[in-house]
Amino acid sequence: MRNIVFLFIISIAFLGCGSSSSDSGSNTATDSKYSIEYEGLLFYSKDMSVGSYSLKALTQQEFDALSLEEKYRVSDKLLATLFFGMTKEELEQHFDANDFISSIQTNLQKDLIDRSALESEILNEDHYYISTSGEQEAVTILARFYAMDKLDRYFFNNWSAYILTQTIMFSPAYELDSSHAENIARVYNRLVTLLDDEATMAFVTYTHMISDDNWRRFRSPEDNGREMLEIYTLDQEDSHVPIAAKALQNWSLDRDYDTLVIGLNENTTPLQLFGTTIYNGDDFYRELAKSSAFRRGVISRLVDFFFPDATDTKKASIISSLVQSNPKTWQDILKQIVFSKEYLLNTTRAKSAEELFYSLAKKMDYKLRTNSMHYFQDWLENMNQATMKYKLGKLTRVPLDTLSFAFFHKFIREEVFLRRSNPNSIDDYTAWDRQGWDQSFLDNENFTYDYTDEVESVSSFINYLFLTMINREANSEELAMFINHFTYLKENDTQTYFYSQFDIFASQDTRENNKRNIAIVVLDYLSRLDNVYIFKGVN
């Protein structure tokens, strides 16, 4: 009966509270939802303000005080972490306006994306191939990040859901025979919907724990109880497992249909766990999500995910700061992390394939063909970075063993850096040569094109490519290497001549081809530098 009562209450909560944008006007109906709770489990909460963060955020003033190269590095880290990117021109506009950090924080509270148009676009079979396989759900999610052209509230909620499903906490785990690729959409879409409705992380997690999707991953009362304790509260105390199993004794997975079944043989013996008395599965999951150990446990999971190479002492300090802020929502934790000085200035770690690809796609105006996202999904598999596949999530977010990284480098070099979109195929989404960076990436407006000095013009072009791709200009040795490769000297003549295939002062058609030739040489070189694959700290 208690389970039925809860399911009735939770259905009322879903039906009664639609999404609410933080910048919309306050009203009684909206305000009342923040008081909805069940046995102390709070359903909804507004996000924390930046000023209330305990993990100190990088302020706009502190960002403005950085050097230009440091601004490029920090802005790229923030944007790429969020699966986004900006062109050099866009970044410099924000630098000049002194609003890079503040504008992003403001926009993440707004609804700027036309959601209906976005969802119609990624389901447009003329632009995106739609497979009948279950893994299509993962491809659709990958396509959505490519298609979203603004950083806003919807973008951040999608990104948050994606991050959570990469971890042990919410992985759909479609590699298991009891799970299904369709679980990807069930878990991910539920997360996005709840995050959009301002659900608390306790409510989000509770809703997940009582779902078929969770039980398809951990299938027996003992297994599910043990894993929920360890995953969400870091509790590895063996004596707690039988207690959890007793509370869940009437919960099971029907293996014929992989469906959660809650029987009538509910436990009626009082059990002590989480510093309180519980009886059944409803009590177990609810009190777990309400416990202080839950908050510290999930924060620890996310700190491990974003600071994988930090010392134990440093991680403990970050976790302590986040716990002290008393976050109520997943956004409270994730925003504190990505906007923190600790992350943006001090942290060095390998980029994930998604972080690198989506950032480059925005910077280079990268075009897709109908099958591109399916191939990206395949590349992620080869890199051992498959999305939402693994039972325990991505325990190593970016595998750097020789084979995994070889596939990572091969994808970035061959499919992104060296692949140019053919402008003649721009309207043919099935054409193989439609995929690649657009010619606009090399527009003269992006660098100093001086008709009186070809060497300086080419040097400016090289520096533009360096800044865009690795957040610094070429050093003197690198510039000399490229200029020597592109030019030659005639006997008894001190003037520098460019080889015909690199002459950017040639006729219009030839000039554009020659710029591409230069770009390919420089991009090939850049694809081999660690700066491409690593977020580096400033301090």
Image (cartoon, grey):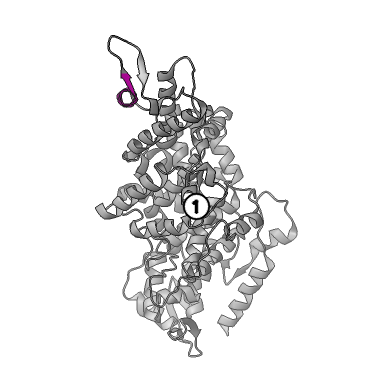
Residue 241 shown left or right of residue 20 in the figure: left
Please identify the quadrant where the N terminus is shown.
bottom right
Residue 12 is at least partly visible in this image: yes
Q: Which residue is mark 1?
A: 431
Front residue of 43 and 92: 92
Residue sticking out furthest to the left: 402
Front residue of 179 and 293: 179
Q: Position of residue 144 (x, y in %)?
A: 54, 55
Q: Amino acid at mark 1?
A: Ala
Whether residue 517 is situated above or below residue 124 in the rendered picture: above
Residue sticking out furthest to the bottom: 265
Whether residue 409 is situated above or below residue 257 in the rendered picture: above
Please identify the quadrant where the C terminus is shown.
top left
Residue lying at 32% horizontally and 38% vertically, measured from the top left: 529
Q: Position of residue 339 (x, y in %)?
A: 48, 43
Front residue of 447 and 4: 447
Q: Secondary structure at mark 1?
A: loop
Residue 198 is at least partly visible in this image: no
Q: Position of residue 184 (x, y in %)?
A: 48, 67
Instruction: Please tell me how crowded label 1 is: few (under 14), some (14-19), or many (20+) other residues with Cα within 10 Å.
Output: some
Answer with the quarter of the image where residue 36 lies: bottom right
Q: Bounds of the magenta span?
A: 476-488
Residue lying at 40% horizontally and 65% vertically, measured from the top left: 389
Residue lying at 36% horizontally and 51% vertically, measured from the top left: 316
Residue 268 shown left or right of residue 412 in the figure: right
